[in-house]
Image: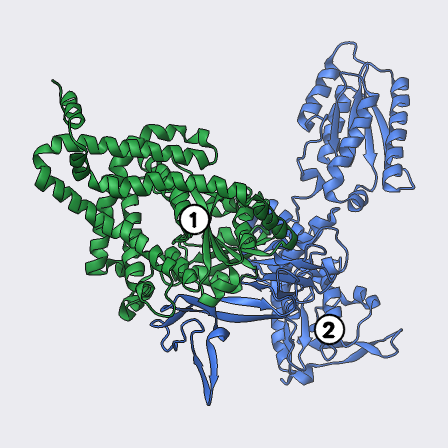
Amino acid sequence: MKAHSLLHRSVLDASADAGHNALVEIRVDGDCFVYIYDFYLGMLDRLAQYDGIIIETTKSIFTRHAVWRIRSYFEHNLFLLPLFLRRSSRILDASLGAMTDGYVSTEESLFEVVSITRSIQENREKIRLPEMADIDAQVILGHLAYGVSRGQQTIKPIIDRDCRMGYLYPIISAIEANGRIRSSVVELLDEAESLGYVKARMLQSTYVCSSCEDAFLQFREVCPACLSSDIVTEEVVHHFRCAHVAPLSDFRQEIQGGHILECPKCNHELKHIGVDFDKPSSMHRCRSCNKDFQNYHVYARCTTCDHDQNVEHLIKRDVKEYDITDKALASLQRGLSAREPDQLGEVIPETMDWSLFIKALAFEADRPGASGQLVSIEIEDLKGLIKQIGSKNKNKLLTELIQVIKASQGARDMRNVQLPFLYFTLLDTSAKDAEDIAQRTVFLLNHLLKDNLSIKQALLTTELTPITKGGVTELERKKLGV
Amino acid sequence: MTLLEEIIGYWTHADWAKIGRVFWYFLIFELMRYVIVDYVVVAIHFLDRLVNRKRWDRAKEALHLVQPLVSILVPGKNEGKHLFKLTRSLAEQTYRNFELIVVDDGSTDDTRIIGRDLEARGLIDLFISNDVRGGKASGANIALRYAKGKYIVHFDADCSFDRDAIEKSLLPFYYDERIAAVGGNLEVRNSRESLATTLQAIEYLKVILVGRMVTSYIGIYRIISGAFGTFRTDVLKRLGGWDLGPGLDGDITVKIRKLGYRVHFQPTANGLTSVPNSFKKLSKQRLRWDKSIIRFRLRKHKDVFYPNANFRMLNMFSSFENIGYNVLLNISWFIYVVDILVNFGHLFIYILPANILLYTVANYLQFFAIMLIVRKPEEKHRLFFYLPAMVFYTGYYLRIVRLIAHTKELFFKESYKDPWNPLKSSLKAKALRI
């Protein structure tokens, strides 16, 4: 069956703002692709419904913009979608090749597109990307998911002159360029390595500007005295006979039909290198300041910020490739992330481990004459909060919150963090007093959050429970989600 | 009667004719040259300072007024470990207008890295590194080619200098415009390291400090040490710099003298140098030095003895003094020994102790003269204890080394095999008989 006979085109969208058609639907062998030959942001939400995307490449700026926007989209249904380029001419941009899944050059090649698409779909079905509060973790796993869905075991850097570092890693670099993350690509990949998702392998080093960390630098050899590039280099000649040493031009004598080398000291002709003379070194002369030197300085001018610097001051960056580990594959298959807050296992100072906390509560419940209260404070929209402050600052915030809570407690009281809940006890305190203390504490905590994170609405809600055996059991059930 | 009493008794009863016959060598050459002349020159030195003080003051004023750029050249191989100390020593100099050019002559150690680093830090103005070794002369010549100063100071990397050493070495150029080269005084830095270095410390005081003062005052100063010499750049460039070594220090001095310029020894311009710390290493060094006397004085510069248009009496006398005292007197000493053994062999037991005593006394007399002019004499007191050993050091050890060197060079031209020069240069020099 001819490929073109499979094509069924229908104009989907007469572009609202451009005034012409931007999307064309193409059905091939049961799969539905969308063919884009113009791009605007509004179309992104609609693209996820297709099996794959084909992008027109006649306008290189448009092509790059479309690919990068799709690959940096926050919904994995879109950024993992098979993406093809319609090759009308040779595409020089290596990054486009790395972030897409193939080329459509003829209608026959659509069969191959279908084959690739189905392979990616098969791989994608094995992946469960977890819903994550942490944008960094989301990007890391999204990046890995992209590699896994393409059957890649290794994430390799690609030289790209539009990336600040000079190299890009598909997906992460696109997201960074989109401004969606605060961390740099390298920081994210290092984080992925520390979580055990990838194993790094050093490929090479690159140097970036000490001012703006951009890799696009113009190098030049300069005079160490005046930094001029107007330098001439000349070989130095050593005449064995008289030990005279001077630049080659001192020996050069122009004669009819050529030149000879004649020693200016002893007037003997230098005929045979290794027998009469040798060239032990060479010297440079700056034509600007007449400085003679052997070791010129190398300066690098940053093409982005125009900072001119000695190469010794450039910042060295390692360029690595990353093997995806079994742990990453397992996480993607189970839909879990090591970066999820409840799996962090990070210790907040002045708090107790959950099991210890429960045991201590049970003891307290059994204590004759005990009249303590357990206060639970829930942080509403925890994910939004962490997104705002970044995962790295989360512990700092929790530590500060716990310090405020501790100030309201007695010496025997305990604290525990089970996000999104903060638990603390008010032992030997009546229910009424405990309620006052809890309300005042929540007021202070809300105040702290509002003042420092420019949050307008209160983020914390509180609940008071007497410390009894039944209360402790209820708490454990709540933790297990039963 | 003990042997000592017997010897004393013998010589107290001996008549002057016999003493003159037996100790003729000492009385004619040694006493005259190394004791009497030394005292005369020390006296002249003090007189000169007194009489010409104003002239020296004017020279100092002129130097301070002009403040010419001085190029300090330090060629060497595997000298990297000394370079930082050298730059520190130079940083302390009272004369500040200088450029430092260091040449790495095909080093096989970290000299290149060290030199480049010091150059990057601004402690060396120009560091030239040659991939292949060319020899000391070629190293100095490449530095000379790129030197911009009006005067050239040639240093060895392992030397350090008094704070006013460069200033003092420049003064003679403003004292007498006919002076084209000035030799600085060198003392031994590692004199306490071993017996060999201690004896060399005494030798340097005798030969370099006093010996060169003597030759300088007489006008026959013949060797400006490569470790510390100052030259007029125009004269050096006119000569084409240094010729192939070994012995290039003496060679360049003769070449300057041949042009009609004066060379001057400046005893107040002081530097310290390290000397070989064992007799084995010392023998190797002295064999090289002594061979060069034959090669350069007798062969290369034999024309100073020719009565031609360029003949100058002082130049001839300078070379004659050099050859005479180093070669002829050395040979004549062995003749003296044969003479004594043949004619007075039966008195040898009386002659040898007396000879040693005479030389020891002469050494002390000479050292007293040295103490009158040497800087920091209090630091030299310990050397008094070693003066008796100098009889054997200069009287026997150095004479034997010198005889071996002269014989090897006279009959076998061994200096062309000396690894001090690269083989390519030595082969060329030998083929061309230079």
Tell me the CA gap for discs 2 and 1.
91 Å
The residue at the far bottom in this view is A257
Q: In the figure, A200 relative to A166: above or below?
A: above
Task: Say what secondary structure mark 2 lies in.
Answer: helix
Q: Residue at x 28, y 63 (%)?
A: B299
> Residue B217's mark?
1
Q: In the figure, A84 relative to A447: above or below?
A: below
Residue kind at label 1, given as amino acid type: Tyr
Which quadrant of the structure image shows residue A155?
bottom right
The location of residue A182, given as percent across then percent down, is: 75, 51
The residue at the far top in this view is A368
Which quadrant of the structure image shows residue A422?
top right
> Residue A63's mark?
2
Task: Say what secondary structure mark 1 lies in.
Answer: helix
- Circle 1 residues within 10 Å: few <14, some 14–19, many ≥20: some
Q: Which chain is blue?
A: A
The location of residue B120, given as percent across then percent down, is: 58, 53
